[in-house]
Image (tube, helix red, strand yellow):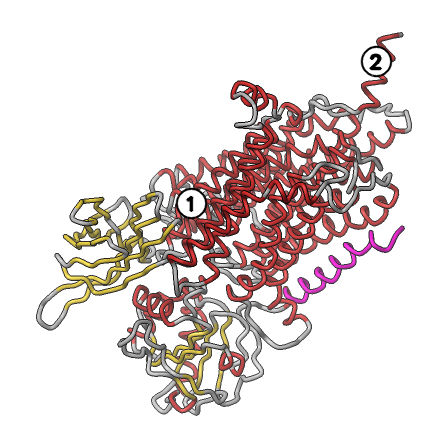
């Protein structure tokens, strides 16, 4: 019964989406001509609210079906089991293709609701158009769900129990990874809708940029967090200490992130200088398009990856059609309408805008490179050429040459003024930073003699970015130059968006340091360790004390106890596990990690070995991963930066109004 | 309409065509130019020592090592940096333990340390392993991504090519029936 309510709500949501996607759009067009005599423009809001209610009802129905283990639903049978802990029964809702698409439209409708709630100050026409375009996206995806991926399909007869959720997905990190990733992907649909609405209206101005920015920022925060969670999961769950694999699915989330980061920066230029308008609109369209392509790559089975769910060609064809309509349609609209946009102001190459443009070029290059690397096997296959595979070697070789100038420019850009900057003065202000950076590089080269020179480069980049950002803050607040109370007053007067930038840039510096440490200075030891035996790794002593068989809620496991000490001082006890899940009989490793500022002590348990002499030993793999916790800390600092910027008064959603409308009101009042 | 503004839609059209062609290919059953031909010529050394004094691992792999006189054999291309390889590994372990057919491994573009750790953690199902450090042998085999698996019959001819990880379903529905069918003749 609950499943039928869900199914029916989904159909009703689909009907509402058709109304939301058409009538307000037509109404807004008629209104521009001064004859909105049907009130169609006003339909957008109730339709969006109804849309949210029905889709959340469908989502709730599916969740209830999972929690109550309703094994008459084929999705529940394939992805759940009565013995599954409650958290994973809930996360299993989106741990499969059908449910994850439902989550996708649920988040889309949530954003629609947010426009209704927070967008009260948007001009009526713009709001109707934005909601209408959101409605059209919703139509496409609801059609996709209803016809090719219905989560409410029944099984008859219902089996006694389910086949269980993939054990790799039974993990808190991965339970929350997809929702954040989707909040990011779908959040970019807001920027897309605003861009398309602006193209229809033929108007892009600073007010438009101020409306778009908070949505983009929110999506960016969610995507950053989602990527971070995914990487963290891979780090401790796959059990071999790596945190990024350049897997197609990971790339599919990184590409929109790079494009979205570029969009955040170019929107600033539109907001402050009324320039780079066509480019920003294009970037808004591309960012969401890349999110859609990411979804397509993961869902259609065009590229194989461990993360992708079942492959099904009909779904692939459907998604491709959806892509062609959405992306192709919006790009045609862009080709048609963008030339009509009023050209923006000019600026010198050496200026804040100039460096933001450089940032955009480099970020787009980075996104393009990752996209090409991910799709290369597919392209060659399509033209019937040689077969190749593109692995981490390609990405490492192409990504770094783009990252270095990007980080260099990230420090110089904020020091330049708008319109026309003074590069020599900016460089002079950075002399202390240069000295600090070179000192760091020299120190690394000295202490890490014979190591990889890339380590010095990585730490140099991190130091440059961190000290450069800090110096800019110190100079802006004139700390040490004027009385502390004056500096404090200056600090209080800086906009929050400024602190957001400082935090995000500093966070990236921390991430770069973490990546460098984790990939360059990793020390790993692998051995057959007897009970009671001590192994030394990176100055730490690891003693295997016991290995015991234990039982979890839906798995059995071997748990080792490993005492860690340094110079006779006890540090911690690590308990790595090796689990065998009851239903799927699939083994997983649960690494044990002790984190500190210096790095992670990372221990994973392997197989038991019994020698002819009757002695027993266990394969243990012990890593010292220097600075890896910095990656996650840096990601959190970046997200915090985004949130602080989001809290900026100027970016409060819908707060800004168009100059013309304000004057119009003022005139009206005067009358 | 300026031509620069139409550029994005043109690029996207090309991309869409590539996607459409990509969809027509069943990702798990790419035809191979090598089907019904003998295995290509290649000569690979073992996985080198990661620290001084360690024994080489896997024994190396050359064309003549693929001993098909006792029946069907599998050749699997894998790498420690390849996440899907991890997904198919339990199936290869089970196959090797069952003794139905030996699995030979080509370790593509890997470092000795990573490959050794990976095998030590996940188990080593391979009868022999050749280290394809520069990826040339994989090109001889026409490999497109990692992992890939080839099935060779008693006369040493390639009979089937599987692209992507062999999931339990593939093992049950495709690989095992094929081994049985090819093995009968």
Relative to A34, A133 lies left or right: left
Answer whether residue A213 is visible to the viewer in this image.
yes
Give the residue pinned by disc 1: A630
Q: Quadrant of residue A135?
A: top right
Q: Chain of mark 1?
A: A
Q: Measure the alpha-carbon separation of dots 1 and 2.
A: 52 Å
Residue A666 is tagged as 2
The residue that appears at 27% across and 55% down in the rendered structure is: A578
The residue that appears at 66% across and 62% down in the rendered structure is: B19
Residue A44 is tagged as none
Instruction: Label 1, secondary structure: give it.
Output: helix
Q: Is residue A503 above or below residue A322?
A: above
- Give the total number of marks visible in the rendering: 2
Residue B4 highlighted magenta (yes or no): yes
Q: Is residue B177 above or below residue A370?
A: below
Mark whose residue sits in front, 1 or 2 = 1
Q: Is residue B176 above or below residue A31?
A: below
What percent of the width, then of the height, locates residue A204? 80, 36
Viewer-side residue, A332 vs B155: A332
Residue A368 highlighted magenta (yes or no): no
Q: Quadrant of residue A118?
A: top right
Q: Chain of mark 2?
A: A
Region in magenta: B1-22
Mark 1, residues whose alpha carbon is within 10 Å: few (<14), some, or many (≥20)?
Answer: many
Q: Quadrant of residue A531?
A: bottom left
Instruction: Label 2, secondary structure: give it.
Output: helix
Q: Main secondary structure of the magenta part?
A: helix
Relative to A332, A254 lies left or right: left
């Amino acid at each position: 019964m609950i499943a039928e309510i869900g199914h029916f709500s989904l159909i009703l949501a689909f009907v509402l989406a058709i109304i939301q996607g058409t009538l307000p759009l037509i109404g807004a067009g008629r209104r521009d001509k001064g004859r909105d005599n049907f009130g169609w423009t006003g339909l957008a809001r109730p339709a969006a609210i109804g849309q949210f209610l029905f889709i959340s009802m469908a989502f709730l129905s599916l969740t209830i079906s999972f929690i109550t283990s309703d094994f008459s639903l084929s999705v529940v049978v394939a992805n759940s089991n009565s013995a599954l802990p409650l958290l994973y029964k809930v996360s299993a809702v989106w741990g499969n293709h059908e449910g994850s698409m439902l989550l996708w439209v649920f988040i889309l409708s949530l954003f629609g609701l947010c426009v209704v709630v927070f967008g009260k100050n948007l001009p009526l026409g713009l709001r109707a158009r934005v909601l209408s375009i959101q409605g059209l996206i919703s139509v496409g995806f609801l059609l996709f769900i209803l016809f090719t991926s219905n989560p409410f399909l029944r099984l008859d007869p219902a089996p006694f129990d389910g086949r269980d959720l993939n054990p790799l997905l039974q993990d808190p990190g991965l339970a929350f990874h997809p929702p954040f990733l989707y909040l990011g992907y779908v959040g970019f649909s807001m920027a897309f809708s605003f861009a398309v609405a602006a193209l229809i209206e033929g108007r892009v101005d600073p007010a438009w940029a101020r409306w778009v920015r908070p949505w983009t920022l929110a999506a960016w925060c969610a995507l950053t967090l989602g990527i971070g969670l995914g990487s963290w999961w891979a780090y401790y769950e796959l059990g071999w200490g790596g945190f990024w694999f350049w897997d197609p699915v990971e790339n599919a989330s990184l590409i929109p992130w790079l494009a979205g980061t570029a969009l955040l920066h170019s929107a600033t230029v539109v907001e402050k200088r009324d320039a780079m308008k066509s480019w920003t609109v294009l970037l808004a369209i591309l960012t969401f398009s890349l999110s859609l392509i990411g979804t397509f790559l993961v869902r259609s089975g065009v590229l194989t990856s461990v993360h992708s769910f079942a492959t099904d060609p009909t779904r692939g064809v459907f998604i491709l059609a959806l892509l062609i309509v959405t992306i192709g349609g919006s790009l045609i609209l862009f080709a048609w309408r963008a030339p009509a946009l009023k050209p923006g102001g000019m600026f010198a190459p050496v200026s804040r805008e100039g460096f933001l443009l450089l940032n955009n070029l480099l970020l787009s290059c980075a996104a393009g490179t990752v996209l090409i690397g991910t799709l290369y096997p597919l392209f060659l296959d399509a033209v019937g050429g040689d077969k190749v595979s593109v692995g981490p070697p390609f990405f490492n070789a192409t990504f770094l040459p783009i990252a270095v100038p990007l980080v260099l420019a990230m420090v110089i850009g904020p020091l330049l003024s708008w319109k026309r900057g003074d590069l020599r003065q900016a460089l002079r202000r950075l002399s202390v930073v240069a000295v600090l950076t070179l000192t760091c590089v020299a120190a690394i080269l000295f202490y890490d003699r014979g190591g990889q020179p890339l380590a010095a480069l990585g730490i140099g980049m991190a130091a440059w970015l961190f000290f450069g950002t800090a110096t800019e803050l110190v100079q802006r607040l004139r700390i040490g130059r004027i009385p502390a109370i004056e500096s404090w007053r200056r600090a209080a007067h800086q906009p929050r968006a400024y602190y957001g930038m400082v935090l995000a840039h500093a966070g990236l510096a921390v991430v770069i340091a973490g990546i460098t440490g984790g990939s360059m200075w990793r020390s790993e030891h692998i051995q057959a360790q007897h009970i009671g035996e001590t192994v030394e790794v990176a100055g730490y002593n690891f003693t295997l004390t016991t290995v015991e068989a234990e039982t979890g809620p839906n798995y059995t496991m071997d748990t080792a106890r490993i005492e860690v000490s340094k110079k006779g001082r006890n540090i911690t006890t690590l308990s790595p596990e090796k689990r065998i899940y009851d239903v799927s009989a699939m083994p997983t490793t649960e690494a044990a990690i002790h984190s500190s500022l210096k790095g992670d002590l990372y221990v994973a348990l392997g197989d038991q070995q019994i020698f002819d002499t009757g002695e027993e030993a266990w394969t243990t793999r012990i890593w010292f991963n220097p600075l890896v916790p910095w990656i996650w800390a840096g990601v959190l600092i970046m997200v915090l930066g985004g949130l602080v910027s989001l809290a900026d008064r100027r970016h409060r959603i819908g707060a800004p109004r168009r100059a013309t409308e304000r004057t119009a009101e003022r005139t009206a009042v005067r009358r | 309409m300026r031509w620069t503004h139409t550029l994005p839609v043109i690029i996207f059209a090309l991309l869409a065509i590539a996607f459409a062609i990509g969809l027509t290919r069943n990702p798990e059953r790419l035809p191979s130019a090598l089907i019904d031909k003998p295995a290509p010529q290649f000569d690979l050394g073992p996985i080198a020592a990661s620290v001084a004094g360690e024994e080489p691992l896997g024994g190396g792999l050359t064309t003549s090592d693929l001993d098909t006189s006792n029946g069907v054999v599998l050749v699997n291309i894998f790498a420690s940096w390849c996440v899907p390889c991890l997904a198919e590994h339990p199936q290869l372990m089970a196959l090797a333990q069952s003794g139905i057919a030996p699995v030979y491994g080509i370790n593509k573009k890997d470092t000795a340390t990573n490959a050794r750790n990976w095998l030590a953690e996940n188990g080593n199902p391979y009868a022999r392993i050749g280290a394809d450090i520069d990826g040339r042998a994989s090109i001889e085999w026409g490999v497109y991504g990692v992992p890939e698996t080839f099935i060779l019959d008693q006369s040493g001819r390639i009979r089937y090519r599987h692209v992507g990880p062999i999931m339990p379903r593939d093992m049950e529905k495709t690989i095992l029936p094929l081994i049985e069918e090819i093995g009968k003749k």
